[in-house]
Image (spheres, rainbow, N blue to C red):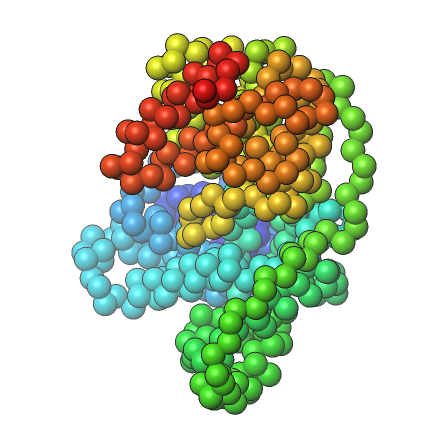
Amino acid sequence: MRVHLDGPVDVEGFRREARRLLARQVAPHCIEWSCGAADRDGATGSLWHQPASGPGPDSGGTPGETEALPPPVRVPAEFAALCEKALLHAEPQRFALMYRLLWRLQHEPGLRHDPLDADMLRARQLAKAVQLDIHKMRAFVRFTRLADDRHVAWFEPAHHIVEANAGFFARRFAQMRWAILTPRGSVEWDGSALRFGPAADRRERPPPDAGEHLWLTYYAHIFNPARLKLAMMRREMPRRYWHNLPEAALIEPLSRQAAVRSRAMVEASPTAPRRIRAPIALHPQPPSPQAVPLSLEELRAGAQACRACPIGALATQAVCGEGPLAPGHMLVGEQPGDQEDLAGRPFVGPAGQLLDRALAQLGWPRDSLYLANAVKHFKYELRGKRRLHKTPGQREAEACGQWLDHEIRLVRPQALVALGATAARALLGRPVAVQSERGAWLDERSDGLPVFVTLHPSALLRLPDEERPAAWQRWLADLALARMGQSRP
Ligand code: URA
C-alpha cells in the first residue's frame, strides 16, 4: 500500500493516515510512505504514485477524504511529542519508522518501558537532531536589512524545521518585517501574521548590508585571543553553518593570530582604558523629517514609526503619555520599562507602582495628571530571556525630544515635573544634577512652562533598605511642593 502525504512536514496528514491504517490493521511492512515534491531529501516524491483523489491510502476502496476518521489512537504523551519532532527530520524513512512504532505500541504494550529498543532509540535520535537544528537556527539566522526596511535572512536547516521555528522568530522580532529563506521552505512575517512559501534558492540570498560590516567589526573586537577554545567553538558553531555566518570568515585569521596576540598582551605593560568613542550611527541615512502631529493619535503613530535612533526597532511599541488634556501638571519620567513596553502605557511597572503609592499618600489623584516619558521606546539589554533596562544615551534622548515637545504642545499642561536626570535634561535642555537642583521650580524654558525637578521613583527602588524611609519622606515632600506650585524653602 502506498501512502502519500502532502509535504515533508505534513504531520497532520501522517496522523490522519496512521489512524486509518491502524484502524484497518495494516501492518507497517505493507506500507510505503512518500511525501510531496517539496521534500528534497530524495524521499522520491516524484517517483511515487500519487493518488488521483488527493492524499490517502492508495489501497482501493473508499478514498481517504470521504471516510469517517476512526477514533484517535492512544499513545503516551511523551511519545506524541517525540513523534512530532522526529517527523521533522530529513531522514526519508521517518514516516515508516514512526508508523512502525505506533503499530508496535498498540501490539507490544511493554515497548514503552524498553529503554534499548532500536526503533525507539532511532526515533529519539531523530527528535534530538531536530531539536538541535531548531536551536541552531535560532542562534545562527542573520538578517540583512533591505532598502525598504524589510529584513531578510538565508539559512540552511538540516531538517524541516522552518514552520516549527517560525513562532519563535515572530515573537522575537515582532516589530520587524522579515523573511527567512531556506532550501526547505520560506517564512515571512509582515508584523501581524506568518506566511509560508516555497523553498528558496541560494541565489536569492540577500547581499551584505551596512549592519554586517558593523557586526564583523564588533566580532573582531570582542574576540579574545587569550580565551580561544577552538574545539568548543566548533561544537557550539558546527562547520556546516559557517558558510552562512559572516563572522565565520574571521575565525581562521583571528585564531591564527591568537597565540602571538595573547603573548603580546602578556608582555605589554598595562595601559589606561581608551576614551570611549562616540557611538557610530546605525542608520546611515538621516532620519526623514517627521510631519508635525496635530493630535495625540498622530503623535502616537509618529513615535511608533520613528527610527531616528536604533531603540525603536527593538521595542514592542512606542509608549506615549496618558492623562487629561490641559492638566495642572505633566509628570515626565525617563523611558518605558519592560512592563510599560508590553502594556503600551506609562508607569505601570514597579516604578509606576511606587509613584502610585506616593500620589495616593498625598491624595493627589493620578488621573488628574498627565504622565509621560522623555524617551518613548524601551531601551534594554537582553540577559538570557530577561530584558534589562538600559539608560537611554544622550543621542537617543535628543532624537526623541521632538516627540516630548509635541506632546507638551498638544497636552497643554500648566507645569512640568521632571522625574530624574533624563527627564530634567530633556525639559531644560542642559545637564541637571538632580540631587542639588531638586525641590525647586526652574524658569528656563522658552515656552514659559515652569519645571520642577525631583528624583525618579526607580532611584528610591535602588536605595539600600536603611536609606529608603528617609528618602521616601523627602521625595513625598518634593512632590507635595510640586503639587502646590512651591519650591523648597
Ligand atoms: N520609568 C519611567 O521613567 N517611565 C515609565 O513609564 C516606567 C518606568
**Is residue 19 visible from the viewing direction of this image?**
yes
Name the one closer to the observer, 63 or 3.
3
Q: Residue at x 81, y 37 (%)?
A: 289
Task: Establish if 205 lies above or below 292.
Answer: below
Q: Residue at x 46, y 21 (%)?
A: 488
Name the one closer to the observer, 197 or 317.
317
Residue 72 left/right relative to 298 = left
Q: Percent position (x, y) of residue 484?
A: 49, 11
Q: Residue at x 35, y 54 (%)?
A: 82
Residue 434 left/right relative to 192 = left
Name the one closer to the observer, 17 or 355.
355
Q: Percent position (x, y) of residue 407?
A: 67, 23
Q: Percent position (x, y) of residue 130?
A: 44, 60
In the rendered picture of this protein, how many numbered marks are placed on residues? 0
Q: Quadrant of residue 228?
A: bottom left
Q: Quadrant of the C terminus?
A: top left
Task: Establish if 219 lies above or below 210.
Answer: below
Q: Percent position (x, y) of residue 178?
A: 65, 48
Name the one closer to the observer, 389 or 471.
471
**Is residue 34 visible from the viewing direction of this image?**
no
Task: Establish if 11 lies above or below 329.
Answer: below
Q: Residue at x 45, y 80 (%)?
A: 226
